[in-house]
Image: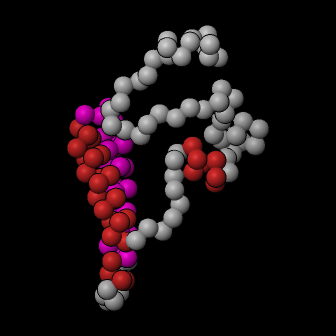
Amino acid sequence: MGQSGQSASEVTTPPDYGLISPISLPDDGRIPDATAGSSTPAEYDSYFRLMRERPELATWSQSCMEVQRRVLNDLDATGLSAQDRCDMLAGFLVVLHSTLEKWLDLHGAAEVHR
């Protein structure tokens, strides 16, 4: 039996909506850490499944486009407030601007007005 008193066959699996797969955390696991009041960069990355690397620019661009496409397709169906939606779109613009600057730098384009 599991810690909650349910056998493995009784544990229900949440529906898969094509999102990030659920992860299991220990009952006493906390982000931020309950004792220190904060988490280490490694704990944060592990918790949110982040991989810190510098991918090739085309791969990065494709990833950004895919994430943005999926979020934009689902945005109307969310319960987010207008302000939350605006904040999300503003974040997309920051990523887009930064990525376009990298492409311009790569191709020796003139300095972009910042």
**Numbered range of the magenta stretch:** 77-102
| Residue furthest out toward the right | 35
Prevalent SS, magenta region = helix
- Coloring applied to the structure: secondary structure
Position of residue 89 in the picture relative to residue 56 (left or right)? left
Residue occupying the point 34% across, 58% down: 63
Q: Residue 83 lies in magenta, yes or no? A: yes
Position of residue 26 in the picture relative to residue 24 (left or right)? right
Residue occupying the point 58% across, 47% down: 46
Position of residue 34 in the picture relative to residue 9 (left or right)? right
Q: Residue 82 lies in magenta, yes or no? A: yes
In this orientation, which residue lies closer to the viewer: 51 or 33? 51
Placement of the C terminus among the 4 image quadrants: bottom left
Residue occupying the point 64% across, 17% down: 3
Residue occupying the point 25% across, 51% down: 69
- The answer to whether residue 104 of the structure is visible from this angle is yes
Spot occupied by residue 84 in the image (x, y as percentages of width and height)? 36, 43
Spot occupied by residue 31 in the image (x, y as percentages of width and height)? 63, 40
